[in-house]
Image: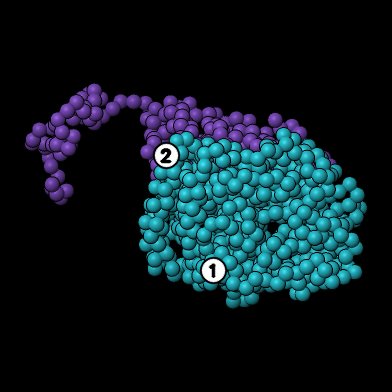
Chain colours: A purple, B cyan
Amino acid sequence: MSSNNPQQSIHDSTAPSTDTRDSRIGEGPDDRFNSKLREAFGSTPFILTKFDKFMNWVRGNSMFMLQFGIACCSIEMMHTYAIKHDLDRFGAGVPRASPRQADVMIVPGTIVSKFGPRMKRVYDQMPEPKFVVGMGSCTISGGPFQEGYNVVKGAEEIIPIDIHVPGCPPRPEALVYGVAKLQERIRNGESSAVVVKPYELEQFGDLERDELVQKLADDIDEEDLVMRYNWADSP
Amino acid sequence: MSTGLERERPPVEVTEADLEAVIGDRALSRDDHLNAPGFVIRPDDVQDVLSDLKERAGFDHLSCLTAQQYEDRYESIYHMKKYADPTQEVSIVVPTPTDEPVSESAEPVFRTADWHEREAFDLVGIDYEGHPDPRRILLPETWQGHPLSHDYDQEKPQLVTLTEHANPVQPDHHEAESDTMFLNVGPHHPATHGVLHIKAVLDGESVVDVDPDIGYLHRCEEQMCQQGTYRHQIMPYPDRWDYVSAGLLNEWAYARAAEDLADIEVPEYAQIIRTMGAEFCRIASHMLALATFALDVYGDFTAIFQYGMRDREVVQDILEDLTGQRLMFNYFRLGGVAWDLPEPREEFFAKCRNFLDELPAKVDEYHDLLTGNEIFQVRTIDTGILEPDVAKDYGCTGPVARGSGIDYDLRRDDPYGYYPELDWNVVTMDGCDNYARVLTRMQEVEESAKIIEQCLDLLEDWPEDERDIQSNVPRTLKPDADSEIYRAVEGAKGELGIYIRSDGTDKPARFKIRSPCFHNLSALGEMVEDEYIPDLIASLGSLDIVLGEVDR
């Protein structure tokens, strides 16, 4: 059919042509394509739903991941994207290098003080709605490095996390399960509200004038963004 | 290309008498370590003594610099070796008083001392006089205190800034016609293999200056190891230094140092299992290096990346059968390994042999896809040149050094494990460029396969009643007080060394990690000067750094 001559009416049967498919599947009990839903549709491809619900469904099935490697877990994350485990099968495996194109950030590794503000910045650059999967024990509590002088005791100190996948590192199957759970929550419209974040980027000039701030006053510009780590108070 | 297991020219032995003659009366006293004779010198003699050792005694490899604090003094230890024969070692010990820890910088003699002394200042707090760039290296610039010194309070709050970075060469490159541009690469960037931050200055499209900014993954590994007991609590951490499946190689570094420190024997059977497991790790690690290098050069998750991952999966399956974990094996024990090969043994052997049988075809496939590709060759040949003497100056080791024609492999030159009994070659290339480094890794994969094959033969025929996997090791290990040792093994990226000082308790008093990636990365500036910015990315990829090991 040429698109230059628009067809005004349908002459033949309105049933979808299934010849090729039928011959490929062959005779048998396979009625995957003849579901009740399809029967209900008939020849009119319309469905009535709430727009929000539809958006959630779409969102959950098309998630762009941030290509974001931090530490050991990123090796297993790469294996999750690559063949054999292939996260893309579940509609959630397109790694994007830019945070502006991503919906989901998998945090794969230990967050240390120097990296904390950078991760916050990357998270802030992602467009709404955004979701975070914390991968590995380090993003839960600091993991094996919890007692380190430089280690942030869990990524949730800095950004809100929707799904925690425990393990050191979690197997790819575990990460696939975590992402599938996140998709389920998004589809059901249950993604988390923003939680209180103790560590925020602040302007240096806004900080309370304590001993530490006084000492650094010569080195740091008033306008500079800073993050303050209070190791004694963190869990 | 390959040199066989014997070096062509055995290097000249330097006896202790020769050393004493070279150092002369600058040696205040002796402080011998288990691995090497040690000489104590004054803080203002550092450059003199080091350059004499380099010029007159041939110690051209500053392997490591350990800084530590005692009750009454600070101490910097320069561990020196020879590229020609790493079993010849000497330690130069430089004590400095607690109230004024100032020592002369060794940077004019060895470029690699630059980063080492910055790290020593950052973590321990020793000042190096005459250092060209005395900044912090691992911790943020605004950090208060030196965490590995005795009076550090870990509970105190810290501030970290998120500032714009300024162009460091703006003033001296400010001409009417050419204008420089400052470019941040990282710390979140797909081509930095983790969280490296490169401050690059460009003139047009070529690189004028690069300053790798590390420390975004400084996980206090040395502190963690100093808090653990020798017997079991330290072994899990090495897996997490070089986390690209090179776990067993790293565990061997700790095992070797601690076994030599506490005088523990390892049964021969366990040595063969160790050798085999370590070479599997090397293959997995080099596969990832290749896959991500293709990712860097071609720029997307294309076929070669996926092929590399596919082959790694097979190796990881085998390692999982052997050790019980996919990535963080924790399989070595002091005095052996955790358990014997998995039952049924025939199945395990068959699985390994299947992998080895398929490997040549896969390597051919990589050559077809990657190294035979014209675009790839244009991108890599004659880019990122690292001359051998520059590589030595920066302490480069591993495939990076061997790609520059330096015939240096600790498996052969400082033998350990079962390597001396096996038949394999050290791969060296004379290209000095990105292409040579990639080819070196690919050929090392084949050499590793050769080693594994011989280990499998040995293991298959090993008599059933002689399968000792561990020797008797005391439940609580307490090496003699004040014994110090520095031992290195050939990790996936190069010479991975461990310095341990024991104070008579069951925990090390000082645990220092000499990471090969740290040195290899420090040479990046030399490799990319006046190259194009895409070659910067390719050079970085060909160094195959792992940030967990750079930052520790």
Say if A169 sits above or below A50 in the image.
below
Q: Which residue is mark 2?
A: B347
Q: Residue at x 24, y 23 (%)?
A: A36
What residue appears at the point 82 percent right and 57 percent down from the top-left corner? Answer: B32
Quarter holding residue B173: bottom right
Q: Position of residue B293 (x, y in %)?
A: 49, 58
Task: Give above or below for A22 relative to B55.
Answer: above
Q: Alpha-carbon neighbours of circle 1 within 10 Å: few (<14), some, or many (≥20)?
A: few
Are circles 1 and 2 on residues that touch, CB within 8 Å? Answer: no
Give the percent coordinates (x, y) of residue B10: 65, 71
A94 with respect to B191 (left or right):
left
Whether residue A107 is visible, yes or no, is: no
Pointer 1 residue: B3
x%, y% of residue B319? 50, 43
Question: Which amino acid type corresponds to the residue marked 2 in the rendered image?
Answer: Glu
* Residue type marked 1: Thr
Q: Which residue occupies 79% across, 55% down?
A: B33
- What residue appears at the point 38 percent right and 60 percent down from the top-left corner? B364
Task: Indicate the chain on which mark 2 is placed.
Answer: B
Q: Chain of mark 1?
A: B
